[in-house]
């Protein structure tokens, strides 16, 4: 009887550990979001209106365009897709800063990408 209880305890602890690992993996994968974007022709088609600023100090988000979808693993690393159905966000580039939901600044290196204004982070959460 004690042997059966021991096996049962071990079985339950394995299930609990596996559930904890699965939960952690799901949480991490939801935090690592690919940022696949599609540039639309009309403002009415967009999820997000974007304006590229001239100076880093003016931006909400520093953006680096990556060559491969697999590289778009953190905020600010954008991958352009060919079709709107593939995109996480459809963006429209506005003519004036005041029209934008999000002001971006293009950076030269992948490591520079990321938020300057964390109050706007909700705009890119999926």
Image (tube, rainbow, N blue to C red):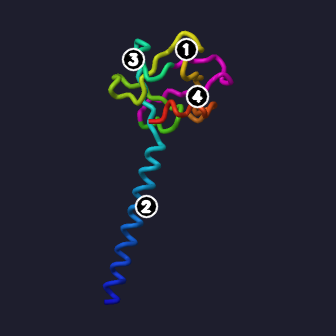
Q: Earlier in the sequence, mark 3 or mark 4?
A: 3
Give the Cα separation between the discs numbered 1 and 4: 16 Å
Q: Nearer the viewer, mark 4 or mark 2?
A: 2
Compared with 82, 20 (above or below) is: below
Helix, strand or loop at mark 2:
helix
In the rendering, at what x and y percent does residue 26 appear? 41, 50
Q: Which residue is mark 1?
A: 99
Give the Cα separation between the discs numbered 3 and 1: 15 Å
In the rendering, at what x and y percent does residue 100 appear? 55, 18
Q: Which residues are magenta?
A: 50-69
Callouts 3 and 2 close, C-beta under 8 Å: no
Screen quadrant of the N terminus: bottom left
Callouts 3 and 4 close, C-beta under 8 Å: no
Can you name the residue that lies furthest to the bottom here?
1
Q: Nearer the viewer, mark 3 or mark 4?
A: 3
* Residue 87: quadrant of the picture: top left
Q: Which residue is mark 2?
A: 20
Helix, strand or loop at mark 1:
helix
Q: Nearer the viewer, mark 1 or mark 4?
A: 1
Compared with 7, 13 (above or below) is: above
Q: Is residue 77 left or right of residue 13?
A: right
């Amino acid at each position: 009887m004690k042997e059966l209880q021991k096996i049962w305890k071990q079985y339950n602890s394995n299930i609990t550990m596996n559930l904890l690992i699965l939960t952690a993996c799901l949480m991490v994968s939801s935090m690592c979001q690919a940022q696949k974007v599609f540039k639309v022709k009309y403002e009415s088609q967009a999820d997000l209106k974007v304006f590229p600023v001239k100076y880093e100090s003016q931006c909400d988000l520093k953006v680096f365009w990556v060559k491969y979808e697999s590289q778009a693993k953190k905020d600010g690393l954008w991958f352009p897709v060919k079709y709107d159905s593939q995109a996480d966000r459809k963006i429209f580039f506005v003519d004036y800063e005041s029209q934008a939901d999000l002001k971006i600044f293009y950076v030269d290196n992948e490591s520079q990408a990321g938020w300057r204004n964390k109050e706007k982070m909700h705009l890119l959460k999926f």
